[in-house]
Amino acid sequence: MFWHIKLERNIVLEPRFFGRNMRDTLMQRLKHEVEGSCTGKHGYIVMVTDFTNISEGMVTDDGTARAKFRVEFDAIAFRPFKGQVLDAVVTEVNKFGFFAEAGPMNLFVSNQLISDDMKFESIDNANRYVSSDKSVSVQKNGEVRVRVVGMRIDAQEIFCVATMKEDYLGAIDQDAGADKVADEY
Amino acid sequence: MVRVTGTGKFTKAVSKKLHVAEDEVEDEADSDKEKEEAKEEVVDDVKENADDAGGSDGDEEADDEDDEKDDEDEDEEDEDEEDGLGDSEEEEEEEEEGAVKKGKSRKRNQFIDDAAEEDEDDEEEERGRKKKKKKRTGASAFIDDMAEEEDADDDDDDDDEGEEEDLDEGEREAVELEAQQRIHARYQNMENMERMENEEELEKQIKERYAAHMAREFDGDIVGSVVDQQALHPTVRDPKLWLVTVKQGKERETVVCLMQKAINLHKSGKGSMAIKSACVQDHLKSYIYVEAERESDVKKALQGMRHVYHSKPIKLVPITEMVDSITVTKKKVENIQYQSWVRMRGGVYKGDLARVIDINYADNQCTVQLVPRFDYALLQAKEEGTAAGRAKPNAALRPPARLFTEAEARKYNLSLERGRMDRRTGDRLDILCGVHKLRDGYYIKTISMASCKLAGEPPLDELQRYTAGEDAAGEDRGEVGAGKSTTEANLEALAASLGDRSASADQVFRPGDQVVVVKGDLKNLTGIVDRVMADGTVQIKPEHELLHDILDVDRENLRKSFKIGSHVRCIEGRHEGEAGLVVKVEGEVATVFSDVTKEEFLVFSHHLADSAETTHRVETLGEYGVHDLALLKDDSVGMLIRVEKDAAMLMMSTSNFDRPDVRAVRLHDFQRKLYTRTLSAVDSAMETIEPKSMCRIVDGPGKGMTITVEHIWKGVLWGKARGVSEHGGMLVCRSRDVKIHGGRAKDPVTGGRGFGAVPMSPGSALLRSPSNQDNGGPQAAPQRGRFGGGAVGRRDAGLIGSNVKVTAGVYKGYKGKVVDATETTVRVELQAQGRTVTVQRTQIAQPGAAPVASSYGAAPSVASSVDSFQPPARTPQHRPTTPAYNPGMTPSRDDGAGGRTPLRDTAWGAQTPAYDTSHWNDDTPTPGGESGYTGTPDVRHTGTPDLRGGSSALAISASDAGYRGKFITGAVVVLPGGKQGVVRSRSGDEVTVQIGTLKTLPNGETRMESLEGDERETVSEAELELAKPQKKDKIIVVEGTDRGLGAELIGVDNEDGVIKMDATKEISIYGIGTLARIFVG
């Protein structure tokens, strides 16, 4: 789920950046530091949308002459929840199941959680899960809709286990997926 | 334990103890005969018993007797009137209890009880042999008669011999009488048997028989057992215990032989042995205990025994150890039973899991079911008779364990007989090649019980492998786990194969565990463990809308439950410590997707515990956690990618993208943890890589992958790559094969690393070498402004790939190819030895080229690093004609690196601030390379003429380029006054000479020994002479075609000098006047 939240952060700047473009540098550095990061509370910070306030710089007391700024900003955060339905792009398929990514987040769908009629097959190192009537397949770069069933939140990432074994879940946008595969090979 | 006992006090004590133990034992394992056999048994006063038992199976019989005796103790009291019946019942029991017993024993059994009972009597009170005999005719007439009847032949033989030898008439008569009496007794016995119907008499008889025994039992109860035991401990007055060495494996036999000997002696009336008892402990190999007063008694008793080592000393067991040494500690016997899991001990199947499907304790054999490891090719070869004497199957190269399929047999054209009835298993089996029995794809093998051992609870994955395809046998199986139906069936099979054991009391619940009730009224109720009581009940907080109170539930009725998606940690078993997300729960078995390995594994749910939502990396082995870099004892380095129960999987630095070198390492093989936070490496574009940098692999295998660097060690990167699922996404690559994402120089925001590298002082721009703008090329690397040191790791690509020769050090004389070079060292792949060594740059030379030495000139940063700045102009050494010399590149101010340093062009000289003459107003070196040089003073300070680093090759120095005269820089010359000195510089005709001190040699000639002070004289060239070089002097040829070549004077012949050229090692002869001695200090 995406959230638009207010956050604060301290940014430390080296003296060589002091001067006219300091504000730009600060913003740049904040984006660099924050965008793509992940915390358990807020999830992934996808994008910094606005700087609401930048405090006065305080030269740090550690002899490096760097200055510390407190920056308040708005950001879009992506935080998945158990039970949430997500669309994801398959990144890897193996016999245990498949990995997919939903934006910055990786998720795994075990073959136990793939509907029973989909079978694993491996042709020329191209692994995929194919339904018995061959109409639906999950392969690399294909798009799937899954439901998050479990989550592990680390310092650096959130990892989910998802299921595709429910109604209204499964491979979506078949043609596009197939095209992408075709492009790749 | 078999034991033959006389009247020893000590053995009595122990036997009493043992009786207690036995009773316990029997309670536990009545049905299992084998168990009892394993347990040590006691037979008291076996002299009598052995009459029945005789020979080597005496011990077995003794066991039986004992069992029956114990039964009798209880039974007979109730049903004493029916002795005969009782006996026949016994017989039946006997048969039921095991097919072990042979029909032979049946007859005897009738009497055994009696014998046993009588033994008790005998043991109770000490009495003489005669008295015993007397009694025998009374109470237990059966036994001896029968026994003697059996042994009659033997005895008669003995007796006969005896008669012939030493018996006189009277005695013979006595013997005959005795024999008659015996026969009479037998008839009496038979009469007794007939009279059995007479119940009253029978009752009387039995009462008579057991009266003494019962009395004794009663006594025993009255006397406190503890005191009793204490009193029975051996004292110094008691017989001693001796330890006798016998042949290994013959311990029991020896004791039985002793028993037999005692019997025979007794029978023949030759008096008894002086030993009290003998016994054997099953766990004590090649020793037996003998109880006797004196060692000589033991010796005498053992005389003539086959398996006794008579030469070995008989040892006395200290009195304090006596009780311990023959006390039988009841050890828990591991029993292989029907359906137990066993592991094979040896051969191709060593370590393999097998299931016992049939067991025969009598033959000590069991039939197991194995996943076959057939070498079909070998079988085929055998079948066709073409097996060319192939050696025994090698355990290291053993065939994979796969279930047998018919397809396989067809493929190899092997004969397969289907559905033959097997006698042993009573099942229909297939026979492969006429030898190998198969059932459902498993190999059925009958093995000795010694060749397998109990497996305990086999790990789940192994079980799964074992059961894999149990249902799919017969059809062609796919990969394990590929088909879902197969896996599911497996799980069921697994659950079945494990029985209820897993669900029983060995579960451990902790507060907070999710549980489900599996039995009773509350079945399927879920809840959370609140408390675990000491008595095994568990208080749970039910999750039900109508139930709010805490409930007490028996542990046995609970099972842990995990919801799909919950984060769990394995607390037991092979995956102990691993954490992951539950993907599937099926009965007892949960599928967990590991956080670290990104693979699934199966575990029993009772081996799992909830993990906090955030993972704390507790996957550690000692101090080593997952993703730590560790140095091993063998100095190899690897990163932990997975931690298992007692080992960690390490990805070694020798790994490749496509060939990861992953090893299991145990804790004691670790040396220390490596901290790489502060380390860095350079990528292919000489940008600095630090931990957590994002890099793209641009070369070698794995090209195109993007990795996040985790660790850096000596140019090797461990990184995490997206899209790699093996080993938790970790891979290893060389730092030179990667390119860092968005080179840092271009990124003002990321800046450098912290403060150290960020501020480029304004001076750095000035200090930057002009080649930064002008040259580029291979020299681009070292151009970045550096502050002090840090030279290590900087590469000098120019030298890499060239062939060099090592000129000094341990590798002197070796030739090799440079594989890596820094400013100070080079890595040389030696041609001769096929290995790579590190050599100082000063110690290598390129054959046929100027010596390669430290490339001081190479890096313009020299300008800013004062330390490393060297006086530019040095002794003339360079031959402009060196092949390596690029004519366009002028020789450098030092010894040779200039050969590949395009520094000395005019542009450089003009632009480098460091070379600005204003900085060096005295003795300013003119950049050496300009042709048409006209002798600016060359030497600054007191600089010793170069030849730095002991480089032996000489060449004409840069400052002499264009000079055609004899007095080259560095030459030793004789001044008009006889003084000698070294040419330092020239200006037109004037030569500046540094005066040295002289020494007179034994041959009368003078020679300049050293340069002291800075005394200089300027003399015109015409007044100078070259000093005459001596043997072994370094010289330079100053005339002729070889002018400028360095050499060593190896001999002087009048006016000719014999020299050995430095470069070519050729020997030439030159006029001594054309050889200028070069002063090398």
Image: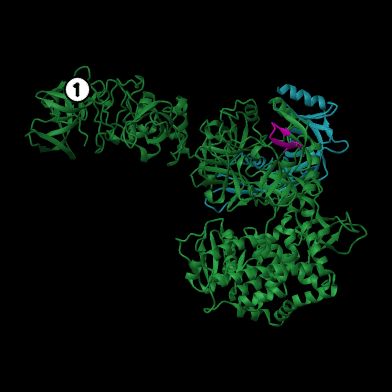
* Chain depicted in green: B
Inspect the image, locate mark 1, and give the three-letter code of the amino acid beneath it. Val
Q: Is residue A27 visible?
A: yes
Q: Could you say which is closer to the camera, residue B71 or residue B340? A: B71
Q: Could you say which is closer to the camera, residue B1015 or residue A50? A: B1015
User: Percent from the top left, x then y, of residue B564?
Assistant: 80, 46
Q: Quadrant of the N terminus of chain B?
A: bottom right
* Chain depicted in cyan: A
Within 10 Å of the Cα at label 1, are there few (<14), some (14-19), or many (20+) other Cα atoms? many
Q: Is residue A51 visible?
A: no
Q: Which residue is mark 1?
A: B1038
Q: Quadrant of residue B545?
A: bottom right
Q: Residue at x 50, y 70 (%)?
A: B297
Q: Is residue B201 above or below residue A101?
A: below
Q: Quadrant of residue B279?
A: bottom right
User: Percent from the top left, x then y, of residue B380?
Assistant: 65, 27
Q: Which residues are magenta?
A: B431-442
Q: Is residue B862 above or below residue B206?
A: above
| Dot 1: chain letter | B
The furthest residue to the left: B1004
Q: Is residue B1052 found inside the magenta-colored segment of the image? A: no
Image-based side of B339 in relation to B758, left or right = right
Q: Could you say which is closer to the camera, residue A27 or residue B696? A: B696
Q: Could you say which is closer to the camera, residue B910 or residue B164? A: B164
